[in-house]
Every structure is written in C-alpha cells, then in structure tokens.
Amino acid sequence: MTTETYRDAWGIPHLRASSARELARAQGRVTAHDRAWQLEVERHRAQGTSASFLGADALSWDVFARRARIEDTARRCFAALERRDPETADWVRAYADGVDEGLPAGARRAPEFARTGLTPGRWQPWTPLAVWLATHILFAGFPAKLWREQAVRHLGPGAVGLFATDGPGTAGSNGWLVTGDRTATGHALIAGDPHRFIEDPGVYQQIRLACPEFDVIGLAVPGVPGIAHFGHTGTAAWAITNAMADYQDLYRERLRRTGAGIEALSPDGTWHRVTRHTETVHVAGGPPVEIEVVETPRGPVIAGGPEGPDPFGESRADGTGAVPGPVGRGAEALALRYPPRVTEDLGFSALLPLLRARTVADIDRALDAWTEPVNVVQAADTAGGTLHRVAGHVPVRAEANRLRPVPAWEPGHDWHGTHETPYARPATEDGIAVMANARGLATPLGIEFAPPHRAARIRALLDGGRAWTADDMPAIHTDTHLGSATPLLDHLAALTGLTPAAEALRDRLLAWDRRMDADSTDAAVYAAVRGAVVRRLAAHPVFAPLTAPPAYPDVLLPWLALVPRVGHALEHLLGADDLYGIDRPAAVRTALEEVAAAPPAAPWSATHRLAPWRALPTEPHLAADEPGLAGDHDCVLCTSAVPGLTDRAARGPAARYVWDLADRAGSRWVVPFGADGVPGAPHHRDQLPLWLEGRLVPVVTDWTLLTPEPAERTEPAEPAAPDPTEETDD
C-alpha cells in the first residue's frame, strides 16, 4: 500500500494514504523518523525502564510508573478496546507498526541513541495507550491532596482555601472561541495555547492526516495516533483546556505482612489479601533496585508499604513509623485510584470519530467516549454551530475524597457512577467563550482552579473588537498584563516611613503599567520584590512544619514544596483577613528595603529565561544561552516562573494555534522549537524565533505548495531483538 508524505517550508509532515489504517501506519512511521529519541524515551517512561539508560535521575519516575501499574493498565485498556471497538484497536496497532518501521532509520538520525548506548525497542499495540497514560497521569494533580493533608494538619482547614490555586506541576491552557457575529469573515475563530512543561523535542507535533474519509490538520501527541486535543477537519474544529477536574483518589491503606503475603484492612473491619509481586528496575551506572508492587481493592500502592516508612509521618509503637508483624494495626501506605485502572478505558474510541467529524454535533458525540484527562472543549463548524462542554469521566464520591487522602478502612469512600457532563448553553456569551482553567463550566468537578486573571483579560480584550481576524489573535496570545499584581502593590502603597531608596522604588512600582514585558526593568523589579516577599513569608515559623515533607516518592515532591506553594498563592495570602498572625506589612516592607538596596538593572528577560526539559541534561553553557521571555504565570502569555525560587520558566505555551472556520488555509500555528526532534536538523529550532515574537506559521492546505518526499511502500517491520529493559517478572 503506497502512502504519500509531503513537507511544508517548516518541515511539518502532511500525510496521505488510501485508508485510515494505512494513514495511522504512516503517522507512526513519520513520527519515528522525526522524533525517534522522544518516542523511545516516552515508551521507556511508560513502562518504567528509563533509568536503564538515563541513570539515577530517572529512578523515582520509574518506580512510580511501576507501582502505579501504568503499562499494565494500558495493556488491560487495549485488550478491552479490542473487545469493545476492534476498528480503533486495529488502527492503534497500525500506528505502533509504523513506529517500528520508522525507528531504525530515525534512531540513526538521533545522536542521543549513540550517546546513551540505547537500541530502539519494539512498540507493542498497547504502547500508545501507555504513553498517553504516562503523559497525563499527573494532570489531575492528585499530589495536591498530599499538600492539603499536610497544610490542614499543621494550619487547620482554612489552609485549603488560602492555598487553592493553580499550583506547581499543574498543566493549564488558554482557549477562546469567537463566533461569526464578531469576526470579519462571518465565520468562527478558535484560538489558544496549551500551557505545559516546555520540552525539547516538543510535546505537540504539527501534522496533517488525509485519506478518503477525512483530511485533518492539528497538533498530535507524539506516540499517539490521530489528533486528540487541537484539530481542524475543514468544516469543524475543536480545542481543549485542562478542566482542573478532580477524578483521582488517594487512599490511606493499612497493610500487614503475613506468612501468605500482604493483607489490607477493609471497610468491613476485616483483613483481605492483596496482590503483590516484585520487579527489578535497572539503573545505568548503578546497581539494580528491586521493588515490591502492591495493589489493594482501591488501587495500586504508590508510597509506603507493610513495613513503612509511613508516608504520613505518624509515629508508631516502635518509633519507626510502622508496626511490623501480622497482629498490629498495620503500617500505612498510599494507594492511587484512577479511572482507567477501574474501567479499563482510556477514551481512545473518541479519536477516530474526531478525525471524521464534520459538525460540532459530530465532535460532541465523539467526546462522549472521552475519558481522561478531563478537559473543557470548544468547537465550531462552518454552518455556524458552536460547542462548549466538559469531556471526560469524573467519579461521584464523598466530598472528603476530593480534598485529601481518605482512610481505606472506613466506609463511605467508594465510587458511585460518574458526574453528568457540564455544558455551556448557549455555548457563547455575546459571541465569545473563554476557557483558561478558572472557575466556570467545570466548577462542580474540581477543587483548585487557576486564578481568574487570564480568563478575564482574554474576555476584556475580545470585548474590544467586533471584526476579529486570524491575524489579530497573536496580540491576545502575547498579552503581558499581570492581573495578580494588585494585592502586593496595595501593600506597597500602604507603607510609610520608608528609606528614600525604598520609597523611590515603591513609587516606581506604583506607576508601573503592570506588564511583564521582556524589556521592562520595572517588571524585573516587581518580580524581585515579589520573590523576596515569598521567601520571607515561607520562612515564617508558622510554616516550619511544612518545610519537611513526609516520605513520599521524589516525583511527587514538587506539589509539597513550600516556597512554590506560597509563590503561586501569594495573592490569596496577601489578601486574606488574617494569615496566622503573620505581620505581612512588615514582610513586604523588609522585602522592599532588601531589593531597594540592590535593585535589578537588567530587564525582566535577563533572568526570566526559557528552561526546557530534556531527557538528557544540556551542557551548562548551552542552557545559559536559552532565550529570555516576556510574560508570567498569571499573564495570558503564561510563561511560568516560580516566585521566590527562580525566574526561569519551565512551563509555557507548548503550542499556539488559530483555527479559521472561514478558510482552513487562513489558520495559523507555531511550536516552541520545530517539527524535527533531531538536534542540529534544519527544522529542529526554526520556529523558536517566531514563538518568541508571538508570530505564527501559516497552515498550508494546497498540496501543490508542499514538497513531496519519495513515495514509500509499507512493508512489515523486521522482528526486533528482545528489549533487555522490559520486565516480565511477576
């Protein structure tokens, strides 16, 4: 079967095939050619084998992936997909076959394989599902429940509200829909940008997929077939943001070891056997690590065990944090319950119907099969239809489950079906709909949301126009107004008796336009004062118990770090009626005087620099050359620093897009680096200058304007050698 591959001027692949199945195979093959290293890293991360070539830094993730049963869940979900939806299962299998066909040549292009000694392995039919689950398992932010547990224990229930904001590690996005009533063409525009950790290669792949059934452009997730999050079929388009829903639970388990195995205390007051086995995690440059994988009826145990250490830090009779032996109350551990592990469904049955969608009604029906991550979706079509809904399954359970880890041995914490899908009816208000992770459509489904500033700013900007075009959208993408600055500036305004230098600096900040522009020295001064305030608040003795997190895996610790929590919640902490007796004016005064003694002389971009994640660390001199940025965490241009800790931005717009329903060729997109994942390749970083400036790349739809690559005839891949890092011991 012949497939055709074309490239535009930016190296973006445009694929044509005679069937959806062959197209999936071609997508897998071209992704392996462009992103071989990325694909293999993601496969190994999904199966918990990345430390075998990345070393000890990857060990904590691998242990978490094994204990959370990521690959086993993907296997189960694929087996269920074969029973429920054999067409989609076959389509996914074709994608994996295509990856296997493309990996050998792709690996020869990528220098990281030689650098680590890694040999490409074999993709199984369930590998795309495992990659999807590994990519998104932390999206619901279940570790935030661990933070709340700690904060409430030491500060009381009021801490939940004080620190309830889009915090460390949470992925967000901007998205907006403008109907034809408010555009120059009379047809809708959909635009936005997903906020993720900026990775190199990028987390999104610009691609076009065409066959007799459909012709779709969009942003794919490397390692997963189709176009899940952002797509334009020609007559309909859709985009998503994180709904900030809570759909995963943590259970405090009491475990004890007996001569026959391990038992967990159940709500009926009896001890029941749980499943357990051991696995070996291989570590490059270090000894292998044997771990015990335990699963209770609630879910896999991700922290603690029958002999401790107790992740909740409570003392036991022997002072070790655990009660050994079969007769005690048991040692406490932490089990994770997440929907695919329960339902054996990762929502892949939505992917083909999305590609085939012609109207918003088609998109709506496709999204009924969506599982996770739970998203807010906006869609429009050329007939004027619009859609604004939540997609995904959120279990119905007790309110306590949503807030903190709950005791597995107490009744009342079961799941009972799923919440009804929230819809916005009508989909827009005065021709506009905005989604930016703030409270709104998904409020009944979550606990913590992003502050309202991005959403409010986008709406205010859109309200200022009645004839929007695709070319107007970058001005919204790159808006740098910082709405969250008000509480700190109010505190500064109230200060009296300052030294002359501090008074001058205070007056300068009060006159500042509140824009975090790259060339703004005032923005740098504000960030410096903000960081100093965060550090002083975090250092107060009242917060001292929160500086020593309990014995959780390292991969979960970002959610428990005090300084980032204070930094992202600063607006709440400064605006609360009382903050545990802390003298906030004094803290602000001291911070201002500190900065006034040596104020920043360089602009914001001097310290607010891009800090992308790479599986292999970059040489220090190369990392120092990463570009400076505009924006900040609460700007529409959401380039997230961590106030009080670093001005560098590890999170930001992982892509930008504008879908034009008047003419798909009028659409625009850009990614932080480029289409090719190979360092030094012409299209590895060629989009970076545009991304930095807020410019977008035109979407090309005319095949005659594309450059064809030599026609490929697909042949079965040669059997791969066994992957020595794959574990089969049970």
Image (cartoon, rainbow, N blue to C red):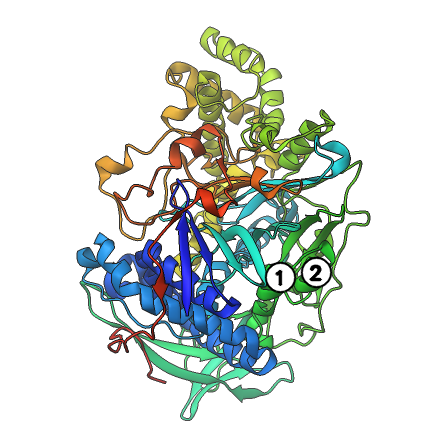
Q: Which mark is residue 362?
A: 2
Quarter of the figure that contains the C terminus: bottom left
Tag 1 and tag 2, C-beta contact below 8 Å = yes
Compared to residue 576, the image places residue 382 above or below, namely: below
The picture places residue 625, in percent across and down from the top left corner, at 28, 32
Residue extending furthest top?
A: 500
Compared to residue 705, the image places residue 92 above or below, namely: below
Q: Amino acid at mark 2?
A: Asp
Left or right: residue 238 versus residue 313 is: right
**Depth order, front residue of 50/558:** 50
The picture places residue 214, in percent across and down from the top left corner, at 58, 59
Residue at position x 37%, y 66% in the image = 99
Left or right: residue 533 versus residue 83 is: left
In which image quadrant can residue 635 be found?
A: top right
Q: CA distance from mark 1 to mark 2?
A: 8 Å
**SS for callout 1:** helix
Q: Amino acid at mark 1?
A: Arg
Residue at position x 45%, y 9% in the image = 501
**SS for callout 2:** helix
**Depth order, front residue of 611/721:** 721
**Depth order, front residue of 700/407:** 700
Residue at position x 41%, y 51% in the image = 6
What residue would you read off at disc 1?
356
The picture places residue 651, in percent across and down from the top left corner, at 45, 42
